[in-house]
């Protein structure tokens, strides 16, 4: 009888890998928490404490949570004829057609490589600008107060009004604070037609 109890106890101690459904549930919980934090930021909480860290091409950027909206997989993008090469198409985000921009290409650099990690970060609904940026990877929330602000270099890429500040994190990575509100006022950004 003691043998059976020990075997049962040993069997219960085995590490069980979570099933796919459980992993999906955890991912959904994480996404829900991220959405809650982003909504809190849009209401005024977390004002500048945390920003959304993203990778666009090879660059690391910080987005103000009040300016960024929904984050979705890149999925299917529908090309729009007679547009500039940095305007990569339209995406259907919850029934709304959203224009998608490749920021490095807009800056005259190479196209962002479209792969499974790519996401579209939509502009916040409050900005009334139905567009989004193609990002190579979403890196999660970053705390700017833990970074060191450093000066911009004198070059054309860093002299854009929509690049507000430049930071270095404790790992030596360079981050640019990207203002979507200022970006949508850039006349070149508004001219998508060729």
Image (tube, rainbow, N blue to C red):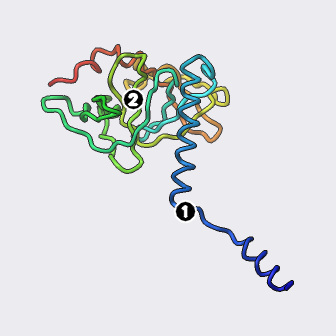
Q: Sequence-wise, which precedes: disc 2 or disc 1?
A: 1
Left or right position of 182 against 146: left
User: Horizontal placement of 167 versus 188: left or right?
Assistant: right
| Kind of element beneath mark 1 | loop
The quadrant of the picture occupied by the N terminus is bottom right
Name the mark nearer the viewer: 2 or 1. 1
Residue 73 in percent (x, y) is at 38, 43
Looking at the rendered structure, which numbered label has been put on residue 72? none
**Neighbour class for label 1 at 10 Å: few (<14), some, many (≥20)?**
few
Tell me the SS state at disc 2: strand
Per the image, the residue denoted by label 2 is 122
What is the x, y in percent for residue 94? 35, 33
Compared with 86, 184 (above or below) is: above
Q: Is residue 119 above or below residue 99?
A: below
| Residue at mark 1 | 19
Residue at image position (33%, 41%) is 112
In the image, residue 176 lies at what x, y percent? 50, 28
Q: Residue, x 65% and y 38% (percent of image)?
A: 170
Disc 2 + disc 1, Cβ < 8 Å: no
Quarter occupied by the C terminus: top left
| The one of 148 and 28 positioned closer to us in this rendering | 28
Q: In this orientation, which residue lies closer to the viewer: 140 or 151?
A: 140
Within-10-Å neighbours for mark 2: few <14, some 14–19, many 20+: many
């Amino acid at each position: 009888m003691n043998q059976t109890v020990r075997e049962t106890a040993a069997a219960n101690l085995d590490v069980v890998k979570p099933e796919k459904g459980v992993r999906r549930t955890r991912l959904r919980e994480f996404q829900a928490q991220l959405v809650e934090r982003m909504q809190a930021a849009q209401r005024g909480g977390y004002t500048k404490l945390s920003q959304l860290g993203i990778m666009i091409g090879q660059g690391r950027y910080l987005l103000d949570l009040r300016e960024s909206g929904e984050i979705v997989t890149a999925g299917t993008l529908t090309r729009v004829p007679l547009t500039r090469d940095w305007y990569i198409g339209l995406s259907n985000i919850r029934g709304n057609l959203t224009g998608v921009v490749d920021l490095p290409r807009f800056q005259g650099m190479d196209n962002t490589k479209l792969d499974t990690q790519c996401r579209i970060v939509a502009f916040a609904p409050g900005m009334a600008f139905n567009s989004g940026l193609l990002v190579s990877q979403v890196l999660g929330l970053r705390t700017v107060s833990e970074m060191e602000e450093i000066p911009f270099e004198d070059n054309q890429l860093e002299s854009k009004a929509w690049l507000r500040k430049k930071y270095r994190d404790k790992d030596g990575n360079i981050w640019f604070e990207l203002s979507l509100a200022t970006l949508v006022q850039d006349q070149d950004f508004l001219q998508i037609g060729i």
